[in-house]
């Protein structure tokens, strides 16, 4: 029996999905705990697609606990069953189909064809068979795939991309990953780069993290997380000076502007400033110091310092001047082991380059904004609870070293034996304090919380 396990968050609830690639059975279990190291079976479905809830009380309790932590109302027994059947079952069926349709989950193509054929005959939803050209719809009914669509579907399935808990991208878009098969030492920690069309139209972007400037997804690239992951946060602060004369002038200007219309205010500003200077001159010992200060300004010399050994107090202060945009750098080492993987790496490199460059409008009168990227870290197939979140970014620099080991080497078909890729992304909008509070934008609630931006 070959069981594929996957941690998943369903409506904020932590669960484990187990799919048996021999029988087509899928089980939904609770996450393991100290008191229950294997987890409890909450629901399952046979190969025919019929679902049953095994432990309704525990399942609904765990689900409602996750709802409360998200500030949502718990569900009654009837509401929970409807939510499971209408919202959960279709999603779990899609997840099962992704596992059973995935060629890499079988030891041979013959086994893959035999298994998917048996699942089609059993009525398993969303199964596709390369050999017969048959497919089951979401209800488990069998249809024949048109030849033009069959080739595209089967080519995709041979090395199925890692979708984690997200829906596959829309038809016509690319979903790429490296490595093509699972490497044990990499575990399930990955980073995804999803290219989106740039959405213009608003003069000021309020929150690019919530979809502002982010159009439809066109390409998703999944890569293993490598060392040297870091972020750098910064804000702009600048030195500011204001001596007593400037302070008095500012007081006069503020008072005049507040008490008069703009036209009258400008007329009264000079007289008010003059009165303020007269008032300052009445202060003991200050008159001569100010005269020396301005005399020094006129001749370009520090007369006040020479005569009195003092300067006007500049009231130096460091003041906030604005936010900064964060930059993220990534370095990846690609070492293809077989032809299909080399071709996938080529597609990945071309996808990054194609999405970072501007597009020409019809007639080439204008250049259109390049596509932008959403970057996410994953641990154990769910958003990483201890790595930072990233707002939509522009890919500002991309570098490929085709001879990373200081040696030109190729396979028999000309494919390179290695590629080193480095790239820099810059966020479109700054980070604000209110976006870091709480459990983070991902809404993770596993007694750990998210790292936030």
Image (tube, rainbow, N blue to C red):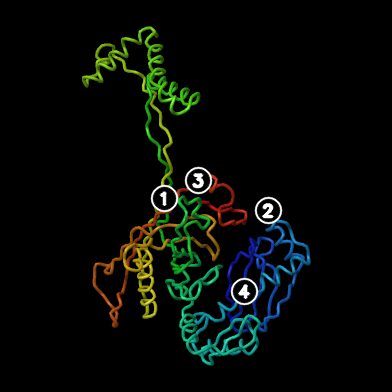
Mark 4 or 2 closer to N-term?
Answer: 4
Left or right placement of residue 33 versus residue 256 in this view: right
| Mark 1, secondary structure of its residue | loop
Near-viewer residue (305 or 230): 305
Mark 3 or 1 closer to N-term?
Answer: 1
Question: Residue at label 3?
Answer: 432
Mark 1 or 4 closer to N-term?
Answer: 4
Mark 2 or 3 closer to N-term?
Answer: 2
Say which of marks 4 and 2 sits in front: 2
Query: Tag 2: Cα neighbours inside 10 Å, few (<14), some, or many (≥20)?
Result: few
Q: Quadrant of the N terminus?
A: bottom right
The image shows residue 345 at horizontal and vertical percentages of 37, 73
Q: Quadrant of residue 235?
A: top left
Question: Residue at label 1?
Answer: 326
Question: Residue at label 4?
Answer: 18
Question: Residue at label 2?
Answer: 71
Question: In the rendered image of this protein, does residue 326 appear above or below residue 339?
Answer: above
Disc 2 versus disc 1: distance between alpha carbons?
31 Å
Say which of marks 1 and 4 sits in front: 1
Near-viewer residue (262 or 50): 262
Disc 1 versus disc 4: distance between alpha carbons?
39 Å
Disc 2 versus disc 3: distance between alpha carbons?
23 Å
Q: Quadrant of residue 267?
A: top left
Query: Tag 4: Cα neighbours inside 10 Å, few (<14), some, or many (≥20)?
Result: many
Question: In the rendered image of this protein, does residue 451 appear above or below residue 30?
Answer: above
């Amino acid at each position: 029996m070959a069981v594929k396990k996957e941690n998943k968050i369903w409506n904020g609830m932590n669960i484990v999905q187990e799919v048996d690639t021999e029988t087509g059975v899928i089980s939904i279990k609770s996450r393991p705990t100290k008191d229950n190291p294997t987890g409890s079976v909450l629901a399952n479905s046979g190969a025919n697609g019929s679902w049953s809830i095994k432990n309704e009380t525990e399942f609904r309790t765990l689900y409602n606990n996750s709802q409360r932590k998200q500030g949502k109302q718990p569900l009654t027994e009837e509401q929970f069953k409807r939510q499971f059947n209408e919202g959960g079952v279709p999603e779990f069926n899609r997840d099962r189909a992704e596992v059973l349709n995935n060629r890499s989950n079988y030891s041979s193509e013959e086994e893959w064809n035999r298994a998917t054929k048996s699942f089609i005959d059993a009525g398993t939803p969303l199964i596709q068979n390369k050999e017969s050209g048959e497919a089951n719809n979401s209800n488990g009914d069998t249809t024949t795939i048109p030849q033009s669509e069959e080739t595209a579907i089967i080519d995709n399935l041979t090395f199925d991309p890692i979708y984690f808990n997200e829906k596959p991208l829309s038809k016509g878009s690319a979903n790429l990953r490296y490595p093509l098969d699972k490497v044990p030492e990499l575990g399930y920690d990955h980073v995804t780069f999803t290219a989106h069309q740039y959405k213009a139209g608003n003069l000021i972007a309020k929150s690019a993290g919530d979809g502002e400037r982010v159009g439809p997804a066109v390409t998703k690239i999944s890569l293993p997380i490598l060392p040297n992951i870091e972020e750098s946060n910064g804000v702009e602060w600048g030195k500011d000076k204001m001596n007593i004369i400037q302070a008095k002038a500012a007081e006069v200007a503020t008072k005049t502007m507040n008490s008069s219309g703009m036209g009258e205010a400008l007329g009264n500003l000079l007289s008010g400033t003059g009165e303020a200077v007269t008032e300052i001159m009445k202060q003991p010992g200050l008159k001569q110091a100010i005269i020396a200060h301005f005399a020094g300004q006129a001749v370009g010399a520090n007369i006040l310092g020479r005569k009195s050994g003092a300067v006007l107090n500049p009231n130096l202060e460091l003041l906030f001047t604005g936010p900064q945009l964060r930059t993220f750098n990534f370095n990846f080492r690609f070492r293809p082991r077989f032809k299909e993987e080399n071709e996938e790496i080529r597609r990945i490199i071309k996808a990054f380059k194609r999405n970072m460059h501007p597009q020409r409008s019809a007639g080439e009168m204008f250049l259109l904004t390049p596509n932008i990227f959403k970057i996410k870290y994953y641990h154990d197939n769910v958003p990483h609870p201890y790595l930072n979140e990233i707002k939509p970014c522009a890919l500002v620099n991309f570098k490929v070293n085709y001879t990373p080991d200081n040696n030109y080497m190729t396979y028999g078909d000309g494919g390179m034996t290695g590629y080193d890729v480095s790239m820099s992304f810059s966020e479109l909008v700054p980070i604000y304090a209110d976006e870091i509070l709480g459990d983070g934008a991902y809404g993770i609630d596993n007694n750990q919380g998210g790292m936030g931006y």
